[in-house]
Image: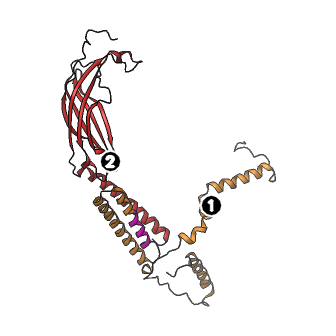
Chain colours: A red, B orange
Amino acid sequence: MYNFLQRLSAITSFAMSTLMVMAILISVTTPLIPSSPTHSLTLRGVQTTTGRRVDTLDKKSRSAEYAQLTFDVDADLTSMFNWNTKLLFAYITADYRAPGFETNRVVVWDRIVRNRRQAKLRLRKHQNKYLLRNYALTFEGVEAANLTLHINPVPYLGLMYDRSATSIPLSLPRAAGSAGQAGR
Amino acid sequence: MWHRTQKPPPGNPRSLSFLASAQLRLVFIRFTSVVHFAESMDFLKPVFESGRIDFEGQSLASSLSTLLIACAGAVALAAGFVLQRLDVCFYAYALCIAATYAVVLPPWPFFRRHPLVWLPRKARGLASGASSSSAQSRRTLVEDVSDDDSC
């Protein structure tokens, strides 16, 4: 610390170390900040069809069963925005149990909420954004199905964590006349 | 290329290939030598090697800077959390660090309150051999210290 350059070097390195400690403190204390969001999810209807031409290069996809969901979402996520929130990732999954596989989870809808203005969700009669299809290409033997809304806060500093919001039961019926038809 | 065990072919020191190799060696040294680079930056010496303070001042500068930076961190975190804005936290921290630089980096007078007391020079005209060699060595020692400060 006997000349200008020495003091500059020592002070700058200690300042950077303190900055690192500050960043660690911020990232560790963020999950402890209380938040009180409200959410509700209602299912209007499920319709399973077969024979959709979703991929012309995949011959088996023509005979697979696809479920179309119609749902409503009411959520107020404003309180989840603190100083360390970059965005909220809201997504809806269908979880079920199928023969041969214990846990199945399909994401059917998602949305990125970037600020408090977009945090009040009021969706009516929304369809699933992504196709809901079982791995076995049919919903035979599928049971204990739930539709769950999740909220993921993505922070500026720290790890992401998942908050599962609400879950409602879901029924995935077989498509009408799928047993007897030739896949055309 | 000739092998090490053989005698090298007779080279004319004035030939083109000899000159080219010497030039290449110089260029190589200029571009890879750390000492050459460091010496070429000597024009920065008055800027960076200045600002000397005495030992008591150095310990004061060290403890002062530690205290100021820790307080800067605490104040910046509190300000950011109260206003609930992360950019306020880091801007406040940068401002406090700039203030710390202003307090500790320049050689203020309060860092020079305890200057070093050097022993006086020995009087000349003593026993010739010993005094002249010791005077020479003292002269080289004193020359190393830069001549901008009195500490």
Q: Is B70 left, or right, of A73 in this rendering?
A: right
Q: Position of residue B85 (x, y in %)?
A: 33, 56
Relative to A44, is A138 above or below?
above
Which residue is more in the foreground, B128 or A113?
A113
Could you say which disc has been placed on residue B36 in the image?
1
Q: Secondary structure at mark 1?
A: helix
Numbered-mark total: 2
Which secondary structure class fits the magenta region best?
A: helix
Are the two marked residues, 2 and 1, in contact with CB atoms closer than 8 angstroms? no
Which amino acid, by three-letter code, is at mark 1?
Answer: His
Could you say which disc has been placed on residue A115 in the image?
2
Relative to A151, is A5 above or below?
below
Relative to A149, is A175 above or below?
above
Q: Residue at x 31, y 9 (%)?
A: A182
Which stretch is magenta? Answer: B94-106
Q: Residue at x 62, y 61 (%)?
A: B36
Q: Residue at x 50, y 86 (%)?
A: B119
